[in-house]
Image (cartoon, rainbow, N blue to C red):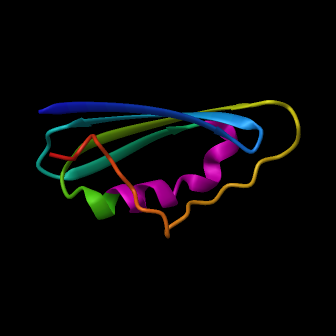
Amino acid sequence: MTDYARASSAAAGASFTCQIKSVNSRSLGIRLRLAPSSDVLKSEIPQLIGKMVTRGSITCNLAVEHDGAGGMFWSISRSLPLYWPLWAN
């Protein structure tokens, strides 16, 4: 079974687009394609996905477009509930 999700948002002088694709697999495999400015998230994104998914081949693409008004500060809020329609039944 293959599923696909895409979400976009804008905040802090930048726009974000995240695409996630899952394909059935016996084990869990996570591949990331991140924007150069988001390398700091390389360890956090697989941890979050691993808490919600136990098997499958997951590809996560994150694109960021800056408005040129300065640097970005990256963090993932663990206090916010996450909703992943990709895996919701």
Q: Is residue 44 above or below residue 23?
A: below
Give the quadrant of the C terminus: top left
Q: Is residue 89 above or below residue 66?
A: below
Point 35% across, 55% down: residue: 49
Q: What are the residue bounds of the magenta stretch?
A: 35-49
Residue 57 in the figure: left or right of residue 60 = left
Which residue reaches farthest right?
Answer: 69
Task: List x then y, in percent, for residue 23.
Answer: 20, 35
Q: Is residue 69 magenta?
A: no
Task: List x then y, in percent, for residue 35.
Answer: 62, 36
Dominant secondary structure of the magenta stretch? helix
Task: List x then y, in percent, for residue 27.
Answer: 17, 52
Task: List x then y, in percent, for residue 7.
Answer: 46, 34
How many labels, in total? 0
Point 88% across, 37% down: residue: 69
Residue 68 in the figure: left or right of residue 43 = right
Q: Based on the displayed image, in which of its 4 quarters is residue 24 positioned?
A: top left
Q: Is residue 78 above or below residue 1?
A: below
